[in-house]
Amino acid sequence: MSGNNDENLPNENGQKPSKPKWWKPFWILMAISMVGSGVFTYFFLQREFIRIIIYEIIFSLALGGAYYFRVRPSKKVNKAVYILVGITPIGFGLSILYAIFCGITGFAKFIMSFEPLGPWLHLGIIIVLFTIGGFIGNWIGKKRDYRLPLSPF
């Protein structure tokens, strides 16, 4: 293994930072709250069992991803997070601005006048806007050296 490994980002002393005292109880409480919410939803809100299981699996994957981001930091994962953060709020915001622009100016009617391709042109424009959001997120990540906010690494 090489000494210049950016998979585990050390602190300025060259050591891995230690976890705070609340670390283990926090994740235990997260798992308990996940199971507790599923039980509560099934018995008190009378929801379908299969739907609750699907939600629990999705929540477990999100919880595992959050745990992975904090326990095994890497520049590759942080880069992916910055790109996803760029796609979701920035790309979505650009799409909302495009929808407002289409509503105000009547641009949507103009695009839809291209009969067979109108909806596909709208979809293509929205995909381009989300892609621009991803590039903006990557640019912000480069400026911050792909370090996540409030991250000890």
Image (tube, helix red, strand yellow):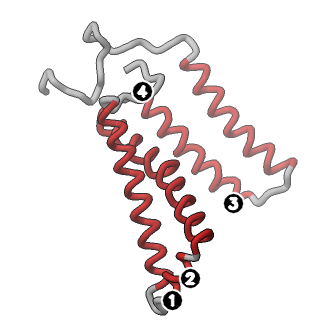
Q: Which-is-in-front pick, marks 4 and 2?
A: 2
Element on which disc 3 rests: helix
Image vertical order of residue 101 relative to residue 36, above or below: below
| Amino acid found under the numbered disc labelled 4 | Val
* Horizontal side of residue 122 vs 134, given as left or right: right
Q: Are marks 4 and 2 in contact (CB under 8 Å)?
A: no
* Circle 2: residue type: Lys
Q: Position of residue 6 (x, y in %)?
A: 23, 28
Mark 2 touches mark 1? (CB < 8 Å): yes
Image quarter in which the N terminus is found: top left
Please tell me which of labels 3 and 2 falls first in the chain: 3
Residue found 30% across the figure and 23% down from its top: 9
Calculate the distance from the C-alpha at mark 3 to the C-alpha at mark 2. 43 Å
Residue hosting label 2: 109
Give the residue pinned by disc 4.
Answer: 71
SS assignment at label 2: helix
Residue indicated by mark 3 = 50
Write the residue at 67% across / 39% down: 34
Q: How far across and how far down the image is residue 93, in percent?
A: 53, 53
Q: Quadrant of residue 35?
A: top right
In this view, the mark in front (3 or 2): 2
- Of mark 3 and mark 4, the one earlier in the sequence is 3
Q: How would you rate the neighbour count of disc 4 (Cα within 10 Å): few for under 14, some for 14-19, many for 20 or more? A: few
Q: Residue flagged by tag 1: what amino acid is it?
A: Ser
Q: Disc 3 residue type?
A: Ile
- Residue 14's spot in the image, x, y percent? 25, 11
Q: Residue under label 1, please give it.
A: 113
